[in-house]
């Protein structure tokens, strides 16, 4: 017997730690959130992958609560911005204010200077305000009055939007949609889950008087170490080729006018490595990639005019593309 095979390497130990993150964090999240485990897994995956997520769902399905509780479970700072038509970029980034005592201008940081930022109803603000997030989401920096300021290493954006209500909303620019690693669709709970929600509400679980403590079970430094360890998740050449074939197929489909770009492929690869580690694997499987295709690619696609006139959806068009590509063994 090879004794070396019985000894875990530092890389294997780090990956094993990541798989424990999921259970530790989920134990805390379950104190307040019933169900929605797939959405929560993708949110944790985005955080570990240095990505951002767009949460789409009707009001009242716990989008804000999920982001706030996730931040508490990892001891991260959390700020929420309610996007409105009159919101200005300075309301997000901050501005210089004249101090009468010092007779000088001082920079007042806006709410974007946080670890986890919830951009609530992001599609209610005009494009000029939405664009204030672009540099922050891509470069992790903001430019204020000619000065470039770095954001914290944990910085992640979780934005929400209502899929039904369109009055008073603005479509997100394609460039901004492309910077979201995931679009997470959050639906209604099942009957059993809703019974559990009502039972919890009946005993005061969601009231201010009955405060439920969410413990910080993962530290920011552990999150940063986990991100470094993800480089050790193995990806076979056939998996890389499969991802490339998926991207190419979206660009060649007659139903899709704008296919997935290179950033989408990078996001799909990084998310696949992270999800594999969260589920206890040190390698990426085809099933892991397939589980992430729709959350990563669907929101980046624009349908052709004929497809839109025919009532086709981006979800259906992407499914057709995926079904035509052989899955690697």
Image: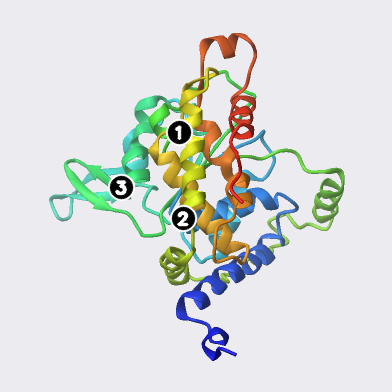
For marks 1 and 2 on the same chain, the one whose residue lies earlier in the sequence: 2
Residue at image position (63%, 46%) is 291
* Residue bearing the label numbered 2: 49
* Residue bearing the label numbered 1: 177
Describe the colour scheme in one phrase: rainbow
Question: Which of the 4 image quarters holds residue 327?
Answer: top right
Residue 211 vs residue 314: left or right?
Answer: right
- Sort mark 3 into few (<14), some (14-19) or many (20+) by Cα contacts within 10 Å: few
Q: Tell me the element at label 3.
A: helix
Residue at image position (81%, 56%) is 200
Q: x, y percentage for residue 228?
A: 41, 66
- Sort mark 2 into few (<14), some (14-19) or many (20+) by Cα contacts within 10 Å: many
Q: x, y percentage for residue 299?
A: 53, 32
In space, the residues marked 1 and 2 are separated at their CA atoms by 17 Å
For marks 2 and 3 on the same chain, the one whose residue lies earlier in the sequence: 2
Q: Tell me the element at label 1.
A: helix
Q: Is residue 114 above or below residue 138?
A: below
* Quarter that holds the N terminus: bottom right
* Residue bearing the label numbered 3: 139
Q: x, y percentage for residue 326?
A: 60, 39
In space, the residues marked 3 and 1 are separated at their CA atoms by 15 Å
């Amino acid at each position: 017997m090879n004794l070396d095979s019985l000894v875990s390497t530092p890389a294997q130990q780090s990956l094993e730690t990541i798989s424990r993150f999921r259970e530790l964090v989920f134990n805390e999240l379950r104190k307040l959130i019933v169900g929605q485990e797939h959405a929560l897994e993708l949110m944790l995956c985005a955080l570990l992958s240095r990505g951002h997520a767009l949460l789409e769902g009707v009001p009242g399905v716990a989008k804000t609560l999920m982001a706030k509780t996730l931040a508490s479970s990892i001891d991260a700072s959390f700020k929420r911005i309610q996007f409105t038509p009159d919101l200005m970029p300075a309301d997000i980034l901050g501005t210089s204010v004249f101090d009468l005592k010092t007779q000088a201008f001082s920079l007042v940081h806006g709410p974007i200077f946080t670890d986890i930022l919830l951009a609530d109803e992001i599609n209610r603000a005009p494009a000029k305000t939405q664009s204030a997030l672009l540099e922050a989401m891509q470069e992790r920096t903001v430019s204020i009055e000619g000065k470039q300021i770095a954001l914290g290493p944990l910085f992640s954006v979780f934005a929400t939007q209502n899929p039904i209500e369109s009055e008073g909303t603005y479509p997100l620019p394609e460039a901004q949609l492309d910077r979201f690693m995931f679009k997470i669709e959050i639906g209604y709970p099942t009957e059993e889950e809703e019974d559990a929600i009502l039972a919890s509400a009946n005993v005061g679980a969601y009231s201010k008087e009955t405060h439920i403590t969410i413990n910080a079970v993962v530290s920011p430094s552990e999150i940063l170490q986990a991100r470094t360890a993800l480089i050790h998740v193995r990806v076979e050449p056939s998996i890389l080729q499969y991802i490339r074939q998926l991207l190419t197929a979206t660009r060649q489909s007659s139903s899709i006018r704008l296919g997935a770009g290179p950033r989408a492929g990078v996001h799909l690869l990084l998310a696949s490595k992270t999800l594999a580690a969260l589920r206890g694997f040190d390698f990426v499987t085809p099933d892991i990639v397939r589980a992430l295709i729709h959350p990563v690619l669907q929101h980046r696609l624009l349908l052709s005019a004929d497809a839109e006139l025919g009532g086709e959806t981006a979800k259906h068009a992407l499914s057709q593309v995926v079904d035509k590509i052989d899955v690697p063994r």
